[in-house]
Amino acid sequence: MEKQKLGLPTDRVTIRHVAEHAGVSVAAVSKVLRNAYGVSEALRTKVENAIDLLKYRPSTAARAMRGRTYTVGILVVELTNPFVPVLLEGIDAGLAEANYKAMVGVGRAASKLETSMIESMIDTRMDGLVLIGPQISGSVVAQYAKQIPIVAIAHHEPQATLYDTVNSDDFAGAQMAVQALASRGYSDIAMLSYDRSDSPSSVVAVQREAGYKAAMAAIGLEDKTRIIRHPHPSEPRTKELAALLSSKDRPRAIFAWSDLDAIPLLAACHEAGVDVPGTLAVIGYDDCSLAGQPAVSLSSINQDPHALGARASELLLSRIEGREEAQHVVVQPTVLLRRSA
Amino acid sequence: MEKQKLGLPTDRVTIRHVAEHAGVSVAAVSKVLRNAYGVSEALRTKVENAIDLLKYRPSTAARAMRGRTYTVGILVVELTNPFVPVLLEGIDAGLAEANYKAMVGVGRAASKLETSMIESMIDTRMDGLVLIGPQISGSVVAQYAKQIPIVAIAHHEPQATLYDTVNSDDFAGAQMAVQALASRGYSDIAMLSYDRSDSPSSVVAVQREAGYKAAMAAIGLEDKTRIIRHPHPSEPRTKELAALLSSKDRPRAIFAWSDLDAIPLLAACHEAGVDVPGTLAVIGYDDCSLAGQPAVSLSSINQDPHALGARASELLLSRIEGREEAQHVVVQPTVLLRRSA
DNA sequence: TGATATACATAGAACGATACACAAAATGAC
DNA sequence: GTCATTTTGTGTATCGTTCTATGTATATCA
């Protein structure tokens, strides 16, 4: 039973067994594993045969003590946003090519938990980190970036010098949404955002608000500019939606910061008998799978999350390889017009 | 730059520094860390002070070489099912109490990828594994369970002796759904499932189908029994839904294996002008957050994912502590009747 | 008093890989 | 045929913990 408490219930195949079986030194096997310089073709095949035969897998734990783990950590704020899984797929695909694995930690939008997860990932000696929409501020990220290569997605901090960022152009995306509505003749365009009391400006919603304001100003509608703040989608907000729809100064068009808010809004419209787009036009953000369903048919902004993830994994790998200067990638979103606007 | 390539860019605070600073041996510090037997109060406080002062964090990587990592791996099939994030929260909460951390791997419903993730988690020397709705068969899980403590959720294998399971009673849940519909006078009740060609019987959808059939038979409706198979929700199936609604032998009521299918079904009804529940009654499964929205108001079966997760973490922790005999927990679901049925 | 527990602390060998320094063999230049 | 250089392979210290074995006080008992 003591053995059970220990972490070694099984007789693992180690690099030593492989070396013995192949009739070479431990160091030689290690070289093959890392495809390091100085291995002949003959040696390589001998070792690889032994590996296959013994079904040897190097212990990441042991590797972590001196070299790389070939594992990167991904920190996500929350999984409920349907845009996240696709992003993860994009990252995963890029990593898989280079024989890297990913482990996901969920920060649940609590900065305390986020830092503790990051530290835990550093402790487990991951080779690099991808942060998705982190709540923590750029300076905190920079602090960690001194210890481990970091790429942040959905985190607007173009001046950062210690880590890379990959972003959809949220500012431009919001502008596109406003322009799309304006070009269809709407002028009374409000934005539906959420209560983001203490969020740093790196947060995407802040960027989208800025883009909204700029676009409204650009077409001479600054007096119509109005940002409605509801609780975060993680909380119920049926009442707020109903109140908004029945209020006297209900806007003619609404740009929602996320489909996560736009879809319940559509549902509330249907409930309250408000015609979309006849009485109220709606455009969302993220182009989640539900938006495309004919029954929903919500206009939205597509960020191409798969591409974002792919770019992020590229950047991270090159940074792990030693790149020092920061890179900041911005991907342009696209508008998808459907029935709701 | 060589240093950068190595994994040790920073000067980590090690257990040795702590020991030196506290004026005790390395072994003593280790004992405090693991709160092992044989440490005096005086020693403990001395060491803890030093730890706080130096901001020491034990290296999980090094721990992994000999002892525990205090980290468990969670393998999820896919993240798109909204029931999963809540489950993760439940697990996380239970683990946090015992100072354990969780790392999530996404298997993306590919058994090849699943096994590779499991192996990777074993290699990183996680202390235990939670598998959520694994595609791989019970015998494969058992194989891994010889190497590492495993608890499987949403995996019906009550005979398993090498690992534990936590399940919602999917068979009973499906019966409840049928009974709920039957008690409201419907008899032409079809089930909407997905094409699960090569899934083992441990998969939840299979259990729900069995429950459906049993319940239909129990109330003398075996001749009305009909299972409609659509592609998995990860694929678009608008056409199939439209065809179903316009077909001549459209059923009077539908029990969907998941809200993931029931909600698009509702949308399609709305689209096609089919009145719910007047013309077609619908009941789903999972009680996802959207189902409760007044505009949607979908009847559904609630599995209490948070409780499932909490039970799973309990089981895993006790298994890590050395428990050998398997335990199989079954949690009863509840019906939530709303407007759709 | 001596014998024997008991509690506390320590030294040092693991764990399984990597990576440095170096030796041996092969190659090339003249 | 000699010397320099390159290629290929090896020995072994090392990473930061845990854990076994062992030591040394101090308390307990007959």
Image (cartoon, coloured by chain):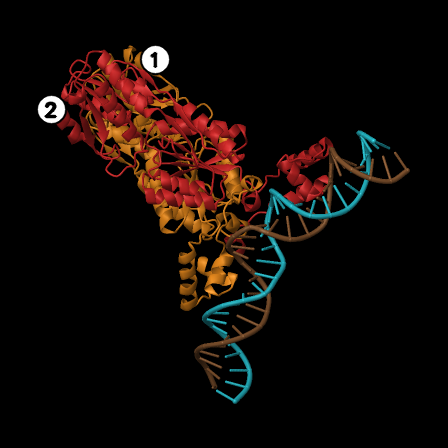
Chain colours: A orange, B red, C brown, D cyan
Quadrant, the C terminus of chain B? top left
The amino acid sitting under disc 1 is Lys
Tag 1 and tag 2, C-beta contact below 8 Å: no
The answer to whether tags 1 and 2 share a subunit is no
Give the mark count. 2
- Where is residue A257 shown, x and y percent of the image? 33, 26
User: Residue extending furthest left?
Assistant: B248
Viewer can see residue A258: yes
Question: SS class of the residue under badge 1?
Answer: helix
When the figure is inspected, residue A69 is found, relative to residue B42, above or below; the finding is below
Q: Chain of mark 2?
A: B
- Where is residue A331 shown, x and y percent of the image? 33, 41
Q: Nearer the viewer, mark 1 or mark 2?
A: 2
- Where is residue A307 shown, x and y percent of the image? 31, 42
Q: Chain of mark 1?
A: A
The residue at 55%/47% (across/down) is: B65
The amino acid sitting under disc 2 is Ser
Asked whether, in this view, residue A147 is left or right of residue B265, the answer is right
When the figure is inspected, residue A259 is found, relative to residue C30, above or below; the finding is above
- Where is residue A147 shown, x and y percent of the image? 53, 44
Between B312 and A210, the residue placed more toward the observer is B312
Between B327 and A39, the residue placed more toward the observer is B327
Asked whether, in this view, residue B256 is left or right of residue B163, the answer is left
In the rendered image, which residue does mark 2 sit on?
B246
The residue at 23%/29% (across/down) is: B193
In the rendered image, which residue does mark 1 sit on?
A239
